[in-house]
Image (cartoon, rainbow, N blue to C red):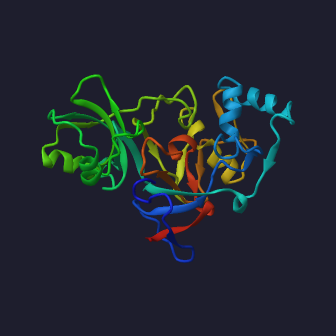
Amino acid sequence: MEKTIHLGRKILVNKLNYHPIKRGDILVFHFPVGDTVIDLPEYQSAQPYYDVIRMLGAGNSDSGRQIVLGNPDQYPLSVRPVDKREAYLKRCIAAAGDTLEMRNEVVYINGRAQAWPPESETYFHVVTNGQPLDETAIKAQYGLDITSADEVRPLGNPTEFDMLLTWKAREKMLKDGFARQIIPDIDSSTTGIFPNDRLHHWTTDNYGPLWVPRKGATLHLTPLNYSVYERVIRTYEGNKLEIRNGRIYLNDREEASYTFKMDYYWVIGDNLHGSQDSRYWGFVPEDHMIGKVSAIL
């Protein structure tokens, strides 16, 4: 959530009266895919079990699962209830019933472009006006550490850099005349992107469109959207779900639709290229919620 919430800051979380949850709210919730973990320090939520089995199986989770189950000393497993999982902190960008799409880092909700919070940050391709970079001035004016390779990357041209900037700093750079062009540095990676299938070719910065399930709403089930809603229907809502010969079976009966029992949310970290969020593990169910941030101290 840098730089909205700096490392070491404290927050107040409303755990009692946080409904309704709206777009833009900062939510605290239990890690949705933390039900099963490889119980070693280097794994846990840092390398989620479902990512590991997919990687070991070269994209086939069933094959990877057999590798893990066959090597309990190398991959000791732990199954945890919801309230024993890690607490995560992310911003809600789409609420139950919304349709989300991200195009070149611009988020569209129900077809309308949304502004990023001023203190959220991402990598930008910056073309300066040729002035030398003064470490002290750049830090004071734009909160940027030019000595950090994580924040500033020269591109071989003395006027061009990749910079990790807040949207607020971007606007100030342009207004001050420091830069003549600042555009988002688009990440086209597909690695680990939910729903991790061969049908959806979504990337880190180009994603969707995707509908967020709402309690009481009915979805027409198809082989195309099966992988998107499979975990919701099976794991979060407790059904048997499978696809056979292109037909979908719910609790051993062929079904063409499903009505959701809970509301769900789509969350992203304010550090767009440094965040483990819904782009990698999907929806957050309402019963995983802990509360909503009411103040940053």
Residue 34 placement, left or right of 199: right
Residue 162 placement, left or right of 289: left
Q: Quadrant of residue 68?
A: top right
Residue at the spot x=63%, y=43% of the render?
A: 46
Of residue 32 and residue 9, the one placed in the foreground of this image is 9
Q: Is residue 158 above or below residue 286?
A: above
Residue 218's spot in the image, x, y percent? 54, 52
Give the farthest residue toward the bottom.
16
Residue 159's spot in the image, x, y percent? 21, 29
Residue at the spot x=74%, y=46% of the render?
A: 36
Of residue 177 and residue 289, the one placed in the foreground of this image is 177
Locate the C terminus by quadrant: bottom left
Of residue 235 and residue 273, the one placed in the foreground of this image is 273
Residue 233's spot in the image, x, y percent? 64, 48
Q: Quadrant of residue 133?
A: top left
Residue 75 placement, left or right of 238: right
Residue at the spot x=69%, y=49% of the render?
A: 235
- Would you say residue 205 is visible in this rendering? yes
Of residue 66 and residue 40, the one placed in the foreground of this image is 40
Residue 99's spot in the image, x, y percent? 41, 48
